[in-house]
Structure formats: structure tokens, C-alpha cells
Image (cartoon, helix red, strand yellow):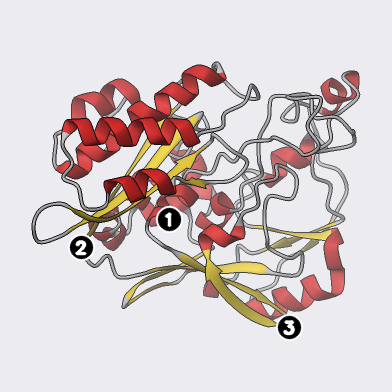
Amino acid sequence: MMRLPAFRYFAPRTLNDAVQILAQEGSAAMPVAGGTDLLPNMKRRQQMPGALLSLKRIDELKTIRNGRGLTLGAGLTLAAVVGEDTVRRSYPGLWQAAVQVATPHLRNMGTLGGNICLDTRCTYYDQNYEWRKSIDFCMKKDGAICWVSTGSKHCLATSSTDTAPALISLDAGIKLESAGGERVLPLADLYRDDGMEYLQRRPDEILTEIILPDPGGWRSTYWKLRRRGSFDFPIASVAAAVRYGSDGAVDAARIVLGAVSSRPLPCEPAAEFLAGKRLEDEVIHEAGKLCAKAARPVKNTDFAPHWRKNMVAHLAGYALRELRGDNMDETRRSIAQHVLI
């Protein structure tokens, strides 16, 4: 049995108390919400904070506000996000991403903010302490070598969040709060292309809100590839959003790739290619090729990298056909092993 290491525990009831505790504790403390990612990492000695700051009792982090768009508290469980009718109706890409995270049990515990801040993953990192010690560890934790590519000067662990690609395709922003104040930035700016230092969030900051703009005619979708139809992290994913002009052509598009880089990867060449074109089969095919070209999978998760790269083109094609209005239920049943209902 893997046991948690010793740590101090804080359970504030207000956001103000939480940021003050983080300011006092410094980088030794880590926020925890559902704990579905952090606690297993602690058992494997991948992350070993001296103190945990529980966010579960802070009601301010669980709000949903409508206005010019939608603001979601980072402390909302994924199950709560899935159950929100406005999300399903106006931001279907986010709904599809959230409903495919893990299992119902884990979605009841895991939070939207936690999935956005999900630790990067790698075959050589996501093992117990003794296994990692036997290979002399890796640079992400306790070692000096990236075992995926021994000549690499930076960690190649993969971003496996489902909701972040969907949110970036929807042009979402986030709010980070600390004892020194707050800052709002595009969600895409939260991420670095580095498997170790993958977030721009400072140790004294708490992710408090996810800010979605008015859908304004944008249609969105999310496609995920994994070995099983539940529980597994993505090995490749595509989030896509398009807005049509009055002539039926694509006025603007956003495509974001997941699980094929150390960060959610916006595919700007494909988005630019789609602008001004109708989603004919040949256009969709070319856009898929551009997505596959941008993908950078490496051998650090399930399935071969070249196959995952090829599948990105197919996932992009499925997403764009769905946004065109095609009935993709049978394809979803084949790829995702269920139909999203």
C-alpha cells in the first residue's frame, strides 16, 4: 500500500483566508480541491508539499454567473459543470470534454480548476518511487535525464487535461488571486511548453474563475482518443470551434490539440486555412493534415507516437464534420466507445 507522506493541513472557509495562508507558507504549500491528481502523486512521491491548502469549503469558488458570457468557479466539480444546462447548450465543446474525464466517481470529486492545472504525465514519471529509483529517476523529479529523449534539455512530459483544450478553443480567460491582488489572463497564456514548469501560476496564486465569452454564434466540439471508453487520460484530443459567416463559409476558427505536447497546442495554421472556406470534404482533409503536422507526440504514453500523430488528422476531421452538421454518433461510438448524450 502506498501511503501519503506527512504534511500540514489547512481548511479555510474563505478565499481571503486561503490566499493569506499561501502567502505565509510560500512554495512549501500546494492548493488541493478534489485531490484526484495531487494525492496519488503524493503517494508516489512525485509531489511532496509540506502543507496542503484545501479549497473544498470555500463557497466562493463554486459559483456560476451568467452575464455577457459565463463565469465558472474553479472549485466546481466536473460533475457540476456537466450538469449545468448553459454549458451543455452554449458551450458544447466544454461539456463534451468534461463528461469524458475519467469516471463518474472521479468527476464527482475532481474540479474544473484541478483539471486545468493537471500535472503533466509520462511513462517514466507516473510510477511509484521504487520503480523510478531503479532507473535513476528522471529530470521531472529527482533525476537529471529525460528518459523519453536522453539528449533533451527540457522535460517532455505530456499535458493530458481534457477541459483546457476545449476552453482555449472557446477563448476562455481565467482569474488568479493572491494576497497581493488578482490578475486575469487568457487561459492559453497559463501554459508553458515545458513538462516540469508547465504552468505560469505562481505558488502564492489560486485559480478562482474561468471566464467564458458570449458564444456569439460560435459552435464547438471536443474529440478524445484513449484506449478505453472511460477512466483513461487522452492520448490525443482535438477541440474545435468555428463561426460561420452569412455566406455559409467559415468566418473564424480555433483548433486546439491536446495530449500531443507539454501544453494544450493551438493549431493556428489549420485555423487560418479554414477562414473564408466552406467545410467541404477536401477542406476538412487538408485542415486535418495541418493539425497532424503540428502535433508533437513522443513515446511517453500509450500507443506509438506516429500512430497518435496520424490519428490527430482523423480527430480533427471528425470534429469539423460534426461542426458542419454531420451526424457523428456512429463515429463517436467507434472512437469514444459511447455516444455523448
**Screen quadrant of the C terminus:** top left
**Is the C-beta separation of discs 2 and 3 under 8 Å?**
no
Residue at x-position 50% and y-position 55%: 112
Residue at x-position 41% and y-position 50%: 166
Q: CA distance from mark 3 to mark 1?
A: 27 Å
Amino acid bearing label 3: Gly
Q: Which residue is mark 2?
A: 217
Residue 171 location in percent, x, y?
41, 62
Q: Quadrant of residue 152?
A: top right
Give the mark nearer the N terminus: 2 vs 1: 1
Q: CA distance from mark 2 to mark 3?
A: 37 Å
Residue at x-position 64% and y-position 21%: 299
Q: CA distance from mark 2 to mark 1?
A: 16 Å
Number of the label disc, if any, that sits on residue 167: 1
Q: Which residue is mark 3?
A: 180
Which one is in front, 91 or 292?
A: 292
Amino acid bearing label 1: Leu
